[in-house]
Amino acid sequence: MSILDTFFLEGKVAVVTGGAGLYGRQIVRALAEAGAQTDIASRRLAAREAVVTESRCLRQRRRNPGPGAARRCPPGGGCRGRGCG
């Protein structure tokens, strides 16, 4: 078991204000990698949408680890063929 397994947040919801900003984006990324559903508040809509897409992909990778996980995006995930990495 890795140290990251102790931060399992599946089934939890996190609200991140300023989630599209410099620090907020990294916080959203960490919470999504741990499995939390993130609700992101930001004044910059386009930047927020990019963070939402990335966090969906990270949560999907958390649910489906293993070879090829970067290619498994959720429906409408928005990765546009780039994968979830």
Image (cartoon, rainbow, N blue to C red):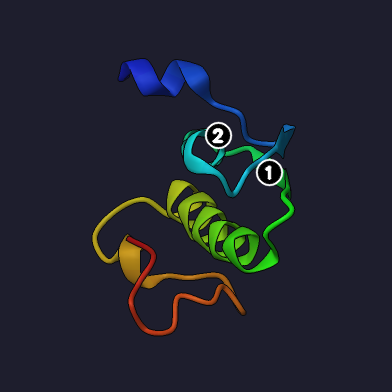
Depth check: 76 or 47 in front?
A: 47
Residue closest to the far front: 43
Q: Is residue 1 left or right of residue 28?
A: left
Q: Is residue 53 left or right of residue 44?
A: left
The amino acid sitting under disc 1 is Thr
20 w.r.t. 52: above or below: above
Mark 2 — residue? 31
Residue 3 disc label: none
44 w.r.t. 8: above or below: below
Crowd rating for badge 1 (residues with CA inside 10 Å; few <14, some 14–19, many 20+) = many
Q: Residue at x 54, y 53 (%)?
A: 55
Residue 61 is situated, as x and y percent measured from the top left of the image, at: 43, 54
Q: Is residue 29 visible?
A: no
Q: Are marks 2 and 1 in contact (CB under 8 Å)?
A: yes
Q: Residue at x 32, y 60 (%)?
A: 85
Q: Secondary structure at mark 2?
A: helix
Mark 1 — residue? 38
